[in-house]
Structures are given as C-alpha cells and as structure tokens.
Amino acid sequence: MSRRAVNITLDNLDDLPGRCRKCVFWELDPVSHDRAVEAGDTAFEKESWVSATLLEWGSCGKVVYVDSVPAGYVMYAPPMYVPRSVAFPTSPVSADAVLLMTGHVLPEFAGGGLGRMLLQGVAKDLTRRGVKAIEAFGDLNHDGPACVMPAEYLTAVGFKTVRPHHRFPRLRLELKSAVSWREDVEVALERLLGSMSPDPGVLRPV
C-alpha cells in the first residue's frame, strides 16, 4: 500500500471530498459566503481562492493518497488570506502564525496514520518557509461535523490556548515543538482529523 501527500493545486482540487470541494466557510467573509451559497457558485469561489493564494503565497494545503485514491486533506494559510478568521471573537490570528483552517480524513482510511502524515507535512512545509507557529480556532462545544476544529483535540496534539473564550478559543502550536511530537500526540492527530467532516449544511454562525 503506497501513501503520499502532495500539495493542493488546481489540478487536484477536485480530489477533495465533494462537500469540502464546494465549502468556502473559511475562504470568504460571512456576507460573501452567504451570497455565494445563494448564487450556487461556491465551487468556483473555492477554485478562485486556491488559485490566488497559490500565486501570492504558495502552498496552502495538502492531499494524501492511498494507492492513488484521495483519502484526506488539510488546508492552511496566513490570516490575511482567510476572511472568516476575523469574524471570530478571539481574532486576530498572531502576525507570525499561519492559520490551520480545516482538514479531514475519510472514515474508511481512519486509523492509518494519515492525519499524522498530513500535519507533519504542514509543519515541515511551514518550517522551511520560516513560519514560527500554527494557530487555530477551536470549538469547545463541538458536537458534530463542522469546519471549526474541536478545541479538545487541538489541545491534545500540543496546541496551547492563547486567547480564551467560552466557545471559540484561539490556540497556538509552536513549530519548534512540532518536530518532537510523541506517539500519543500522533494518535490524537488521527482523532482530530478523523472527527472533521466539513459540511456547509451544518455550519454554525460565529
């Protein structure tokens, strides 16, 4: 069984799960998001965002394949490229950090180490690019599929709360600590990405 993680590009964007391919929760501000949903052109907006971010900043996500079958993905970008980030009560994201937006490993591939592979790939990519940390918004009341990651899983994989909130704390992972993730943290990474299933139909307003 071969496994490989590659950068998200316009050529493989359609390998994201269907709902994720059309989801622009993070890529647009709340008003623009609602307009795109009403117009039915969220897939186009997703492609436009990826194209612009690749041209201006570079790699903004990874897709992992198992025997050439897409099995999961993760997306990340500096906060200036993520309009939704400013809508959170614990914004803004720190200037020296990149925002971990969202990610998902398909259920049939869960438990195979793909979450670890994706997150370590992100850490290595950002470290090479001189980024100091990864930040993410967590959801303390995560009770189902959504684009906001459960806070408990973020803390389990080494993220530390930098701005508390009763619902959406902002958390941070220093990349220098990411290179020494222990095995138990890797298991938590699997749980984190395995729990994610972005679905525009169940998103909760922030």
Image: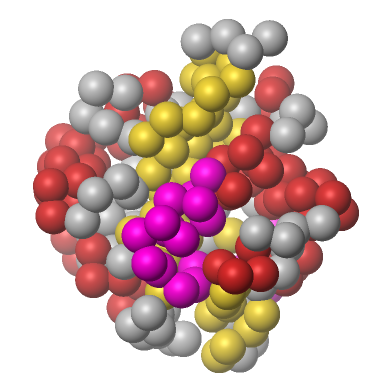
Question: Depth check: 200 or 76 in front?
Answer: 76
Question: Depth check: 121 or 170 in front?
Answer: 121
Image location (x, y in percent) of residue 12 = 31, 23
The N terminus, quarter of image: top right
- Residue at screen point 40% across, 68% down: 131
Question: Depth check: 122 or 139 in front?
Answer: 122
Image location (x, y in percent) of residue 107 = 69, 28
- Residue at screen point 77% across, 65% down: 156
Q: Does the rendering let one see residue 101?
A: yes
Segment tinted magenta in the rendering: 121-143
Residue 126 among magenta residues: yes
The C terminus, quarter of image: bottom left
Image location (x, y in percent) of residue 146 = 54, 52
Question: Depth check: 24 or 74 in front?
Answer: 74
Q: Is residue 105 left or right of residue 134?
A: right
Q: How is the image coloured?
A: secondary structure
- Which quarter of the picture shows residue 89? bottom left
- Residue at screen point 46% across, 61% down: 127
- Residue at screen point 37% across, 35% down: 7
Q: How many marks?
A: 0
Residue 37 among magenta residues: no
Q: Does the rendering let one see residue 137?
A: no
Q: Is residue 183 above or below residue 139?
A: above
